[in-house]
Amino acid sequence: MGVDYGTLSGRAVVVRVSDGAELGSAVFDYPHAVMDTTLAAGPAAESGSPIPLAPDWALQVPADYVDVLKHAVPAAIKNAGIAAAQVIGIGTDFTACTMVPTLADGTPLNAVAAFADRPHAYVKLWKHHAAQSHADRINDLAFERGESWLPRYGGLISSEWEFAKGLQLLEEDPELYNTMDHWVEAADWIVWQLTGRYVRNACTAGYKGIWQDGQYPSSEFLAALNPDFAGFVSDKVEHEIGQLGSSAGTLSAEAAAWTGLTEGIHVAVGNVDAHVTAPAAQAVEPGQMVAIMGTSTCHVMNSDRLAEVPGMCGVVDGGIVSGLYGYEAGQSGVGDIFAWYVKNQVPARYFEAAEAAGTSIHQHLTNLAYEHPVGAHGLVTLDWQSGNRSVLVDHELSGVVVGTTLTTRAEEIYRALLEATAFGTRTIIETFNESDVPVTEFIVAGGLLKNPQLMQTYSDVLRMPISTIASDQGPALGSAIHAAVAAGAYADVREAGIAMGKVNRGVYIPNPESADAYDKLYAEYQLLHDYFGRGSNDVMHRLKALKREVIAASALTAADDHTEVLAV
């Protein structure tokens, strides 16, 4: 059994150990989804007055994750038509870095009645970017001190990661920080719920928790950030590390009752949705880059050598499979950008036409956009509506569209956004190649591979053939592969991936004419990329700062008005 925890839902898949055949699946949508404007949980929300959230926040409710186990797992078993007793192991994967503040027994702080209306008591989702200023301080101090771990992350720590989010929690809600016993990756929290044992996984510890060569940043470093942060590692983070593919423990009686599975079966050590997908796509050899394309894109790849790649999310020994260095890079917004544009910028007539044609609005826009040759729209955009994860590592950056006129149509901007994400991926690949970590094959997994025009665009922009995972459930299949190894069905993840993984090689081949045309657009993208992203013009940072100042002032005015009303 593999369970993939995504941004909006969890999916359970039953997989045959002998050949990776997917026998049944089920999906459960998180009841609270993503809370990014108001706190849609807690007493205030229940009373009809939800607490507003500041810009760049993204929270979730951990109980939603348990509900996936209670609903999707039994449904997947039923859909597979098997007996629950035939399941020998369960593995899970999660978005990362997604953090849960807990008490000593794993109880999330938001489940404590006194804290249910405190935003910092909730899960900070991977795309919670409100800790950018804290990440900046970590980066500046690490650079000044010459910390040896900084180059392992391309020279910059992300606001998405454990330490930046932890520092934000300390400085914005110290009472909650001091109450918290463990600062837990959701990938490990859900395994804790399944087994009753807290085991950190080597993947998130290495990529998101600054754990390198068996060590975390020193207490002296942390104290220099804030004296009260000195014990962050020893008091809140440090714990047993479990290796990928190992068993974290066995299924507890309580979790067996939730899932319908047999008590005592093996539960694999937690993992990240992107990294767990590599063996599912038979892509664990050096040079094989897997792009898991969904709301965001994560790029993972193994190499037999350790190198410093500017702006990478990290390199971890054994971060994907043992015996190789696992590299990670990524784009903070891809499918999220397309969804934002459709939700907020597309006129109603397009939705009506899509419905009449019996197709989705995304496919309708794509079909219209690709009626014309490359460059006909006269546009270039920057794919930074959710900031830039790689290679600039700056979530204060924002989106740009250049070239609009009074005749520009909605589908043209939509295509320019699709193309921009391909340009962002090309920037990442070129950075790896220039750092002597060559990308020799590009494999796509995730929901966006269903768009053939988008996939052909990537092939043309990258000037590389594109292979695709032969599964609609890449992360869940990868989790099932790890579960099979944890249960002893295979010696290691590489062996299991060969037997259970699935890939279609060379599905898309670059078109030379289109590739030449895209080279011209990419040159313009690079100019904008460096102008706005490398310090030539920091207007995006100034606008973000202005936005926060105005919202903060507005909130203070509203609070004062409320106080006056109460006084009257």
Image (tube, rainbow, N blue to C red):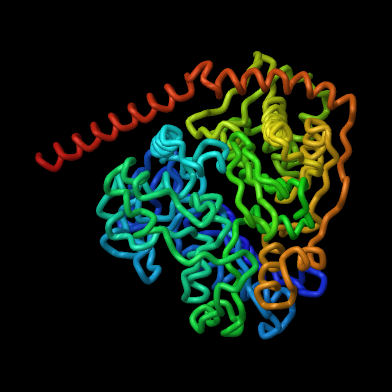
Q: Is residue 87 left or right of residue 464?
A: left
Residue 143 seen: yes
Quarter location, residue 476: bottom right
Q: How many marks?
A: 0
> As drawn, which residue projects farthest toward the top?
406
Q: Nearer the viewer, residue 377 or 353?
A: 377
Task: Give the position of the C terminus as an image quadrant.
Answer: top left
- Residue drawn at (53%, 69%) of the image: 191
Instruction: Pinpoint residue 257: horizontal percent, then vertical percent.
Output: 53, 82
> As drawn, which residue projects farthest toward the left?
568
Instruction: Pinpoint residue 284: horizontal percent, then vertical percent.
Output: 75, 55
Q: Nearer the viewer, residue 302 or 522?
A: 302
Q: Is residue 77 left or right of residue 192?
A: right
Quarter location, residue 400: top right
Q: Is residue 232 left or right of residue 36?
A: left
- Residue drawn at (81%, 64%) of the image: 498
Q: Nearer the viewer, residue 446 or 339?
A: 446
Task: Give the position of the N terminus as an image quadrant.
Answer: bottom right
